[in-house]
Image: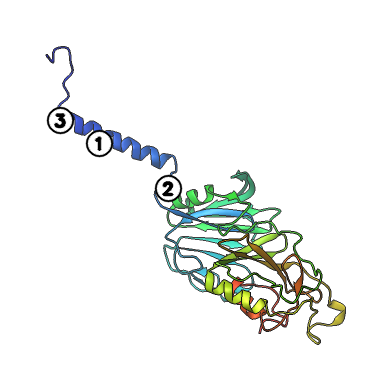
Amino acid sequence: MTNEGRRVVSPTMTAKLALFALLVAALSACGSGSRAYKTQPVGLHDIELEVPAAWKLGQGSCGTPTANTVLWNIGLMHLCQTLQPPNVSAVIFQAYPPQADPKYASEKTIGGVRVYRSTQSQGRYVQLDLPGRGIGVTVFSPDATLVRQIVSSLHTARRDKNGCPTHSPTGGYRLGSRPKADERFIPPGAIKLIGCYYNGRWLDHSVRVGRDRAQQVTRVMNNAHYGLSGMPRGRIAGRWCRPSFGKFSVGHFEYANRPPVAVTVHPNGCARLGASNGTWAVRMSHAWVPTFWRNVTYDGSIANGWDS
């Protein structure tokens, strides 16, 4: 067999061509905005962003990030703001966002969501306001590319990472008929508990706990008495007492060999307070409410009288 008519490529040329191909691939990846790091979803209401999986959530003091992190700044923590360390990257969700600076703001659609976006510091600081949802998101980092990737990942979600619906569920809370003596409010044997906490029409946050804590909640709630409660006397003036279902939790008890059971807890307000498994309800009591709080992390009214 002869090499006549064939082009012979030297080993040196082959190595150069391979290196060139690698460089082209790397530059293409950079230009397309692809991520070379693993991500985790974070969100508020039905809005989610993808941030580096290496970030630990909630690393902050008085609403100020102390490391690369995600914060949910809801409430009065801004009254105690502290100095922020240099070179920190963060995503901060706000329930009542500041208005985007008109000097920099423009209306955009990101992930199918209409936002007002203001970009400053050469792309290293972005403020997103989401009209109609009452929330805002601030993304900042010394790395403008990281900011761009996080912002472009914005999307809506029907369920969060723990499986909680992002819109408030309806129904499932009823007094029902008094159960038989041998009926359990929550079947025993739960292997996990997913707590979904709602504020108004949106999911505020969720938590997932394992077998031991799920069964602890099951035991205390199975000792609760049938019925619904009112606010303890003397807590709030009678003329202000009315049902308020603006803040509530749903606990989803999951099992290995049976369908899950959802328990809706309405602890906020002055009337029709308690928990319902969709068939009947149990009254509020100091015997089960604190245990439920510790596991489902309810953030309702501090004046509800049942949080001790």
| Image quarter of the C terminus | bottom right
Q: Say whether residue 78 is visible.
A: no
Q: Amino acid at mark 3?
A: Pro
> In what element is the residue under mark 2?
loop
Picture coordinates of residue 94, whole percent (x, y): 61, 63
Picture coordinates of residue 215, whole percent (x, y): 58, 73
Q: Residue furthest bottom?
A: 234
Rendered position, 43 above or below 178: above
Is 103 left, or right, of 50 in this rendering? right
Q: Amino acid at mark 2?
A: Arg
Q: Give the Cα separation between the discs numbered 3 and 1.
A: 12 Å
Colour scheme in use: rainbow
Picture coordinates of residue 172, whole percent (x, y): 74, 62
Query: Which residue lies under the disc numbered 1?
Result: 19
* Residue at 84 percent of width and 74 percent of height: 242
As drawn, the label of residue 11 is: 3
As drawn, the label of residue 35 is: 2
Q: Amino acid at mark 1?
A: Leu
Q: Are marks 3 and 2 in contact (CB under 8 Å)?
A: no
Q: Earlier in the sequence, mark 3 or mark 1?
A: 3
